[in-house]
Amino acid sequence: MLELFQFEQCPYCQKVREKMTELDLDYICRNVPKGSETRNLLIEIGGKEQVPFLVDTTDPSDVIMMYESDDIIDYLEKNYS
């Protein structure tokens, strides 16, 4: 399963969403407004508040977690195109 932690207005998150749509990927989009439980989850899982943040649990024995829109896009292209 792919999960994207993001802000709707963030241009870097938008780049990642567009790539995921282009690749026709199913994913869970988690918005992280200030003070939300989801933001607390982002910090707990990733260690910081930065978005976009991708979590790929497709292979439970090798969970991938990453920040940086360009790195996420490269990963998606290599693994899902």
Image (cartoon, rainbow, N blue to C red):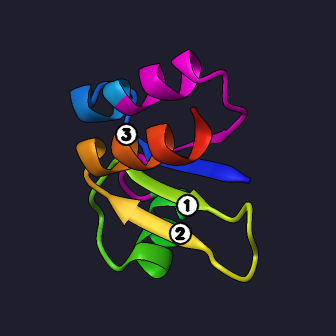
Which badge, 3 or 2, is on the more N-terminal residue? Answer: 2
Question: Which label lies toward us, 3 or 1?
Answer: 3
Residue type at tag 3: Ile
Q: Residue at x 41, y 46 (%)?
A: 33
Residue 52: x and y in percent read: 35, 47
Q: Residue at x 66, y 21 (%)?
A: 24
Residue 46: x and y in percent read: 41, 74
Residue 31: x and y in percent read: 50, 42
**Residue with the mark numbered 3:** 73
Q: Residues within 10 Å of mark 3 (few under 14, many from 20)?
A: some
Quadrant assignment, res 18: top left
Separation (CA) of disc 3 from disc 2: 13 Å
Q: Is residue 21 above or below residue 48?
A: above
In the rendered view, does 65 fall on the left or right side of 59?
A: left
Which badge, 1 or 2, is on the more N-terminal residue? Answer: 1
Which badge, 3 or 1, is on the more N-terminal residue? Answer: 1
For label 2, the SS is strand
Residue type at tag 2: Ile
For label 3, the SS is helix
Q: Residue at x 39, y 32 (%)?
A: 16
Span of residues in magenta: 16-35
Quadrant into which the C terminus falls? top right
Q: Are marks 1 and 2 in contact (CB under 8 Å)?
A: yes
Q: Are marks 3 and 2 in contact (CB under 8 Å)?
A: no
**Residue with the mark numbered 2:** 64
Q: Is residue 38 above or below residue 79?
A: below
**Residue with the mark numbered 1:** 55
